[in-house]
Amino acid sequence: MTTTSKEYAEALFELAAGEHVLEETSDGLVTVISALQQMPEYRSLLASAAIGKAERLKALDDAFAGKVPKVLMGVLRMMVSRGHVSALDNMVREYEELSRQYRGESTARVLSAVPLKESEAVAIRKELEKRFGHAVTVQCEVDPSLIGGVRVEVEGRVIDGSIRNKLEQIKDVMNG
């Protein structure tokens, strides 16, 4: 995460919490990101320094005013005005993480050598929830370099049950 995206996310979170529109703001962010993914040229327009700020802000207002919470519109307008549209995707991720923390949830990044079956992901989620004592959202990713097993990153901790890690431990013992 960039400092810029984190600062926007924190500001948006504080504003949304103050207005009691955390969920509505999350929904609004999904609306905005979906629109920008469907029309990449629109993102380019909002980010373009060659187009006047007033025109970019009008395009933003035309697309989203009344469709997303006012606090979100305010932050989006600030990002467009300051030329920080490129920070939007990271800002959304950071905002969602702040929202999960606020709700007492954690996000676990689960890396595996091959795609996990749904039942495996559910089993990992349940075990993490049991271990941490609160809801955990699991984000699964594939990393073939692990060879086998899984590596879990959650709340600043790493649980490494990968074959790569086990081989590195054996290598350290043999060289040590």
Image (cartoon, helix red, strand yellow):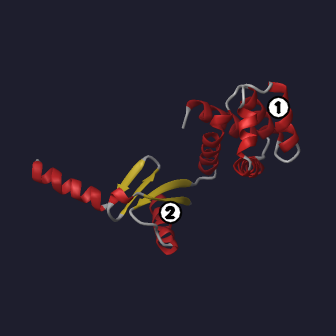
The residue that mark 2 highlights is 129
In this orientation, does residue 146 appear? yes
Name the N-terminal-most of marks 2 and 1.
Answer: 1
Q: Residues within 10 Å of mark 1 (few under 14, many from 20)?
A: some
**Residue 5 appears left or right of 175:** right
At horizontal 61% and vertical 35% (from top left) the residue drawn is: 5
- Of 119 and 141, nearer the camera is 141
**Residue 168 appears left or right of 84:** left
Is 102 above or below relative to 128?
Answer: above
Distance of mark 2 from mark 1, alpha carbons?
43 Å
- The location of residue 134, given as percent across then percent down, is 54, 59
At horizontal 60% and vertical 35% (from top left) the residue drawn is: 6
In this orientation, does residue 160 appear? no
- Of 49 and 67, nearer the camera is 49
**Residue 20 appears left or right of 6:** right
The residue that mark 1 highlights is 57
Q: Residues within 10 Å of mark 2 (few under 14, many from 20)?
A: some
- The location of residue 104, given as percent across then percent down, is 59, 53
Front: mark 2 or 1 = 1
Q: Residue 2: name its quadrant.
A: top right
- The location of residue 105, given as percent across then percent down, is 57, 54
Q: Which mark is residue 162?
A: none
Q: Residue 53: name its quadrant.
A: top right
Q: How many marks?
A: 2
**Residue 100 appears left or right of 56:** left
Secondary element at image label 1 = helix
Under mark 2, the amino acid is Glu
Secondary element at image label 2 = helix
Is 93 above or below relative to 135?
Answer: above
